Image (cartoon, helix red, strand yellow):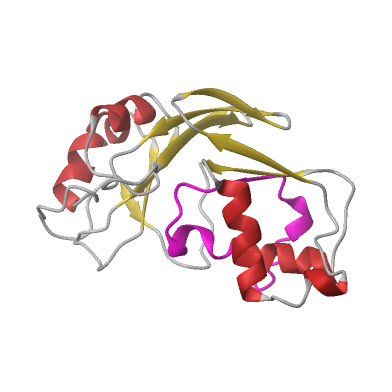
Amino acid sequence: MHLLGVDPKSIDVIFISHHHADHSFGLPFLLLEYCVRYERSEPLHIVGPTCLEERTHQTCELAWPDMRAKGFVPRVPLRFTEIASEGEYQAGNLSFTAAPMEHYELNALGYRFEYRGKTFAYTGDTGECEQLSRLLEDVDVAIIELTHPRPSEDPGHLDIEEVVRVTADLRKRGALVLATHMSGTPEPFDGITLCEDGETYYA
């Protein structure tokens, strides 16, 4: 965020899809910024699966076991929204839908919300499933995982053929489809943007 000129204080809501490290271990470093560099009175909303608050505190304690004892705590009100089932939720001023995804046996979530007149969907990690189709229906921006650049039998992640299939209607009407979480680079496919670190994408 610092390299891109993004002010961490401008973030009001953080969505955690599931408790795997590559989707949640950045959170302690953001909270560390509020321990030593920033502070604000407006709440920071953190949304994720059940046990989110407990795991966040545990991870921070494991990372810096002496900080809390010395009084270093995030100087921002934290508000946790833990998602136990599919439905409509609220985090601050943002209304959103949460839906369970098919990511092995984990409580993994996808999210859908409206912002500045556009409808966004984020799949998190998932295999192809009915709730994925519902999550993506008629959105303007789809942020979708594309773990496997070639066909795969992995039930907990999507491959290029599955992504092409589930985004067909979106691409036909010109929605922005952003592919993330790639284990390799697939062949370019019309209408699917392969995300790169540090880049900015506009809907």
70 to 121, vertically: above or below: below
Horizontally, is 138 left or right of 118 in the view? left
| Residue 166 in view (yes/no) | yes
| Residue 120 in view (yes/no) | no
Q: Quadrant of residue 46?
A: top right
39 to 15, vertically: above or below: below
Q: Residue at x 64, y 31 (%)?
A: 116
201 to 99, vertically: above or below: below
Question: Which residues lie in the magenta part?
Answer: 1-26
> What percent of the width, then of the height, locates residue 73?
81, 63
By secondary structure, the bulk of the magenta-drawn segment is best described as loop
> What percent of the width, then of the height, locates residue 115?
61, 32
Horizontally, is 37 left or right of 63 in the view? right
> What percent of the width, then of the height, locates residue 100?
38, 34
Q: In this view of the protein, which residue sits in the foreground, 82 or 4? A: 82
User: Which quadrant would the N terminus be assigned to in this image?
Assistant: bottom right
Q: Residue at x 53, y 67 (%)?
A: 198
Q: In this view of the protein, which residue sits in the foreground, 170 or 42? A: 42
Horizontally, is 42 left or right of 60 in the view? right
Q: Residue at x 71, y 66 (%)?
A: 5
| The stretch drawn in magenta includes residue 63 | no
Q: Residue at x 23, y 49 (%)?
A: 156
123 to 22, vertically: above or below: above
> What percent of the width, then of the height, locates residue 127?
24, 44
- Label count reads 0
Horizontally, is 127 left or right of 28 in the view? left
